[in-house]
Amino acid sequence: MTATVNCVILLTIAINVYRKGRRYINTENFDKLPEEKRHSILNAAFTCFGRDGYKKTAISEIANMAGISKAAIFHYFGTKRNFYLYLFSFSCNEILAKMESGTDDFFECLRIGTQFKLNVMEKHPGMFDFLFSLVKEEDAELIADVKKINVDGIDKGVVQLFARVDWNRFRPDINKEEANKLVSWVSDGYIRTYAGIKDGQKMAAEIDHYMEILKRAIYKEEYL
């Protein structure tokens, strides 16, 4: 099941690095900030890390974008590595807290997942680019730290979304893995292209249109 949906909703990376309780990172000072200021700092960090990766991102760059001092970030998180891992923890919490249960229709589950992504992106525009950046991350020490993170939440959100899907709706000549990759490229490629250019409602409607085209190519006739 997991292998079939990894490319569909871009959530597995975050879920696979879920940190239980955040007990290793003391964020008490950060948690006391007003919500608007917290979001400003997080969004600046998502944008910078997502664009440039861990090593090339300077804390001063994040601070400038967020309108705070470099010292303030170290006051809130202690180290750059703690800050980075906190962002993963935060992403996981956002994902697991809001993920809905799906239906027996694969494309309806995709619609739910797409709407979820758009809702998260409205609040944290750079989050998914940040999650994507882990795939290209070359810092061996950072990857080692990520692997040590508690994995109690592995795939929880993904399994919940796709648990009821009736895979027998696919045409017998359609390879399920290839179909999943195709719809992922269409949905995620569209979002990455038009995020920040088109509003969420218009994006959702246009993605639904493309999914209907794919549905006619993938599903058995009796399910159209």
Image (tube, rainbow, N blue to C red):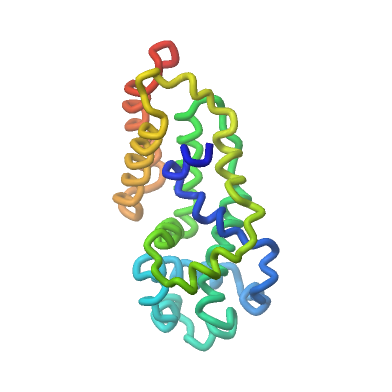
Q: Depth check: 172 or 87 in front? A: 172
Residue 176 in picture, x, y percent from top left: 41, 29
Residue 4 in picture, x, y percent from top left: 46, 37
Residue 150 in picture, x, y percent from top left: 64, 61
Q: Depth check: 175 or 199 in front? A: 175
Residue, x 31% and y 50% (percent of image)?
194
| Image vertical order of residue 81 relative to residue 169, above or below | below
Q: How many numbered callouts?
A: 0
In the rendered view, does 154 fall on the left or right side of 136? right
Residue 212 in picture, x, y percent from top left: 36, 26
In the rendered view, does 26 fall on the left or right side of 45? right
Residue, x 60% and y 47% (percent of image)?
98
| Image vertical order of residue 179 relative to residue 115, above or below | above
Residue, x 49% and y 67% (percent of image)?
143
Residue furthest top in the image: 222
Residue furthest bottom in the image: 71
| Image vertical order of residue 40 relative to residue 15, above or below | below
Q: Quadrant of the C terminus?
A: top left
Q: Depth check: 75 or 32 in front? A: 75
